Image (cartoon, grey):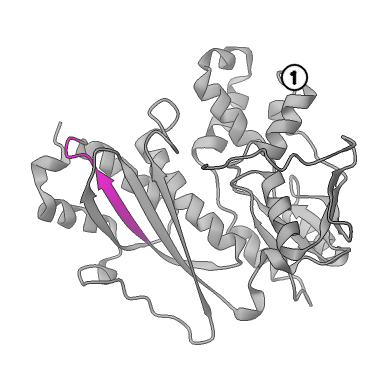
Amino acid sequence: MPTIKDLGEKKLLQWLQTFCQADSVGDDAALVHLDPFQDLVITTDVLVDGVHFSEQTTGPFEVGYRSAGANLSDLAAMGATPLGLTVGLSLPPELPLDWLEKLYQGINALNTPIIGGDLTRSSVITIGITAIGQVLPSRVIKRSNAKVGDLIVVTGWHGLSRGGLELLLKPALSKRLDPDVVKSLIDAHQRPRPRLDVIDVLWSIPQLDRVAGMDSSDGLADAIVQICNSSKVGAQIDSLACPAQLQGWLSQKDALDWILYGGEDFELVLTMAKPFAEKLVSQLGPPAAIIGQITQNQEIYLVGDNSSLDLCKGFQHF
């Protein structure tokens, strides 16, 4: 099987350019044409073999999909529309070209053009993706925009990605579950969908002028905490529904733990005034839901569980 070493750097770069937008690569930097009335939004995410993915849980297509998806989810969390991606790669010379091709197929599956990147040698596969987007200044979603009385909206289920990871790490568990449930959980982990679709729905709501929010890639609890800390407010969480895929094989305690702290679901957590929150949930439909409200008291409180969020849980690099 051919490896990247067999091609050499120049031919490898020429080959990688076939996956990129034709009129954006070939010079010293990518050229992106912007509307003068739009703000530029830029986000970078780095994934390292053995830290963020492994052969046991993630194939090369899924690595590419998740790498791009993580960045596009950050754009969605800011209310931005994607313009393009740059891909930085550090690769072992012995890496099969087939692996690299599938990686790029996964990146391209999210339909955002690759407009440039960089390539270097390394003993460990490292993928650094930068996503560029644009947003009207009046429609920027910020963590610091939450106000007392706002309702908290989630755009979809939480805990599914954590369930998929569990099945990938412990394949024997899959034998106890319906094949459709297994597939939906593993898909949730390997191919999470960045919620760019929410943005158009959000701003179709008349008179909406302020939204706070972020994505839940590091966990639902983490998103709520970050929004509250940035806005200097608290939150009361009234309702956390458990996805059907997690019922029947998990204890209630474990299910709640995965919902709050599992991470990598890539949904949006948003706060806004009550009429707008109700309208958004109605237009998105289930499983979008209102889960609580923003409070003056800076504690973050789970009503049903009669406790506060564990601020030390959730994904942390260090």
The answer to whether residue 66 is above or below residue 142 is above
Q: Amino acid at mark 1?
A: Gly
Q: Secondary structure at mark 1?
A: loop
Of the pair 181 and 194, the residue shown nearer to us: 194
Label 1 neighbour load within 10 Å: few <14, some 14-19, many 20+: few
Q: Residue furthest front?
A: 318
Say whether residue 65 is left or right of residue 185. left
Of the pair 216 and 207, the residue shown nearer to us: 216
x then y, percent, for residue 186: 54, 30
Q: What residue is rendered at 71% in x and 43% in y?
A: 311
- Quadrant in which the N terminus appears: top left
The answer to whether residue 139 is above or below residue 127 is below
Which residue is label 1 attached to? 248
x then y, percent, for residue 85: 39, 61
Examine the structure image and report whether residue 91 is included in the region drawn in magenta: yes
x then y, percent, for residue 317: 51, 42
Say whether residue 40 is left or right of residue 217. left
Q: What residue is rendered at 86% in x and 55% in y?
A: 293
x then y, percent, for residue 277: 81, 61
Q: What residue is rendered at 15% in x and 51% in y?
A: 12
Rendering quarter of residue 254:
top right
Circle count: 1
- In the image, the segment drawn in magenta is 86-94
